[in-house]
Image: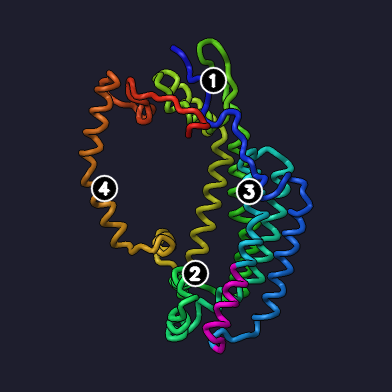
Amino acid sequence: MSPPETLPAQGIKWNLGDLYAEPGNPLFQQDLDKSLKAAQDFQKKYKEVNLENLSPQDFFLALQEYESILENGLKPLLYASLLFTEDTQNDLAKNLRQKALEKWNEVENLLLFFRLAIIHLPEEKTHLFLSYQPLQEYAHTIQHWRRFRKFTLEEREEYIINCKNLSGKTALATLFDEFTSSFIFRLTIEGEEKELTGSEMLALLYSPHREIREKAYRLFLNKHKENQVVLTSIFNALFLDAHLEDEIRGYESPMHRTHLENELSPEIVSLMMEITEKSYPLAQAYFRIKASLLGLPKLKNTDLYAPLPGGAKKITFNQA
């Protein structure tokens, strides 16, 4: 039995030079400061302005300015988030990401009034604005925001939730990423013990060798079970946070917000689930055929991603 030669991303690193030359680049902090200053200036300029009194042209200019602040403000955060994703144990990446998250939270709170004002615009005024040709590129975004009108709170309450999220669900999600990414899995393949990450273990589910797939999956689950106290606490806290906020905002069910975000009605989702369930025999037939091709009497969950015999084709990174 020969193990997989290399994992898909082995030796590959992202080149983030188009954003910043290096993590210590002074432009990173400068951009954070610029975005905060731009948000402060925007608030001073428009906070006391009744958007209903703006002409479509002036509203368009305000939206463009708002969009520009968001784009420039997101750049440091996206860069830091990519660094963190590349290596969640990198202290510099963690510090940069936390700094960017806190600054982005400030920017969002300074601009919060503008989004809320758009959400609460009268329907006829919104229609007038969106009938202006240059504003039509923003039509979907504006209409999407306004779908949440009934569930949007007052500015002070939205501000409190934003601040709370930074030390609440955002911090818990970060803890989950850092904690699970610190897991080291030791798997022996053909007499050689290898140290693998969680992502590398899951990649082994695509191995052509059943024994490797089963060992990798069992070890992956056992590692998480060993840490179930921490993981369960994180998930329970996130579920409770979502439940309480849904109650405060007045959502009718746990899926209500998701349906609005996906711009789907509950009826469409129910229909999709119904059709999917009716199609179970098709999936079952596929798995029976796959089991036969693999020479197995029945598939296990570790066989779902197994490659078919003779179907492997190596493609180099450069070719891809």
Viewer-nearest of labels 2 and 1? 1
Which of the labelled discs sits on residue 249, or is there none? 2
* Farthest residue, direction front: 319
For marks 2 and 1 on the same chain, the one whose residue lies earlier in the sequence: 1
Q: Nearer the viewer, residue 214 or 138?
A: 138
Residues at circles 4 and 2 in contact by the CB criterion of under 8 Å? no
For marks 4 and 3 on the same chain, the one whose residue lies earlier in the sequence: 3
Name which residue lies at 60% across and 36% down. 181
Element type at mark 3: helix
- Circle 2 residues within 10 Å: few <14, some 14–19, many ≥20: some
Q: Which residue is mark 1?
A: 187
> How is the structure coloured here?
rainbow
Q: Nearer the viewer, residue 198 or 231?
A: 198
Place of residue 121 in the rendered image (x, y in percent of width and height, measured from the top left): 50, 82
Q: Which residue is mark 4?
A: 276
* 37, above or below 48, in the image: above
In magenta, the rendered stretch is 53-67
C-alpha span from label 2 to label 1 = 47 Å
Residue type indicated by callout 2: Arg
* Farthest residue, direction bottom: 53
Name which residue lies at 54% across and 57% down. 241
